[in-house]
Image (cartoon, grey):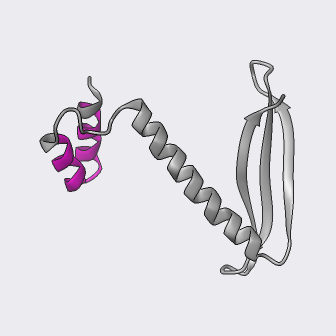
Amino acid sequence: MTAISVLFSLSCLHGGDHSLTHHLLNSAHNATYLSPTVHNEIINTCNDMILAELVCKVNAAHCFSVLADETADVSAVEQFSLGVRYIDCTLGKVTEDFFAICASV
């Protein structure tokens, strides 16, 4: 099954995203934007946007704390997770958000 047929199937299953269906059926085969490279670029761009919004919320908070933890996964690789707890000014309550995870050095 090709990437186009998988996305077309998903489009149909989820109520029919008409713009996605139109794009998959009518675009040139070299302009579908379904390559792993493009997917990674989209994911990285979304990550940058989400982190920027989170940083703005933390900067607007009156106080915040950093949450850090290090643990080994199943394959004994140490991983470091980073979170932040802050007072969300728009909600008026304490919020805790995941920030990042990376392999420990």
Number of marks drawn: 0
In the image: residue 60, left or right of residue 29:
right
Q: Is residue 67 above or below residue 58?
A: above
User: Going 20% across and 41% down the picture, which residue do you hit?
Assistant: 24
**Is residue 16 something that shows in the picture?**
no
Q: Position of residue 42 (x, y in %)?
A: 45, 45
Q: Is residue 70 above or below residue 105?
A: below
**Is residue 25 something that shows in the picture?**
yes
* 26 and 31: which is toward the camera: 31
User: Going 80% across and 20% down the picture, which residue do you hit?
Assistant: 76
Image quarter of residue 81: top right
Q: Is residue 86 above or below residue 34?
A: below
Q: Is residue 74 above or below residue 13?
A: above
In the image: residue 26, left or right of residue 63:
left
Q: State which quarter of the image contains the C terminus.
A: top right
In the image: residue 59, left or right of residue 38:
right
Q: Which residues are magenta?
A: 5-24
User: Going 74% across and 36% down the picture, which residue do you hit?
Assistant: 102
**Secondary structure of the magenta portion, mostly?**
helix
Q: Position of residue 41 (x, y in %)?
A: 47, 42
Q: State which quarter of the image contains the N terminus.
A: top left
Q: Position of residue 69 (x, y in %)?
A: 86, 42
Membership of 91 in magenta stretch: no
In the image: residue 20, left or right of residue 40:
left
Image quarter of residue 89: bottom right
Membership of 7 in magenta stretch: yes
User: Going 68% across and 69% down the picture, which residue do you hit?
Assistant: 56
Q: Residue furthest front?
A: 30
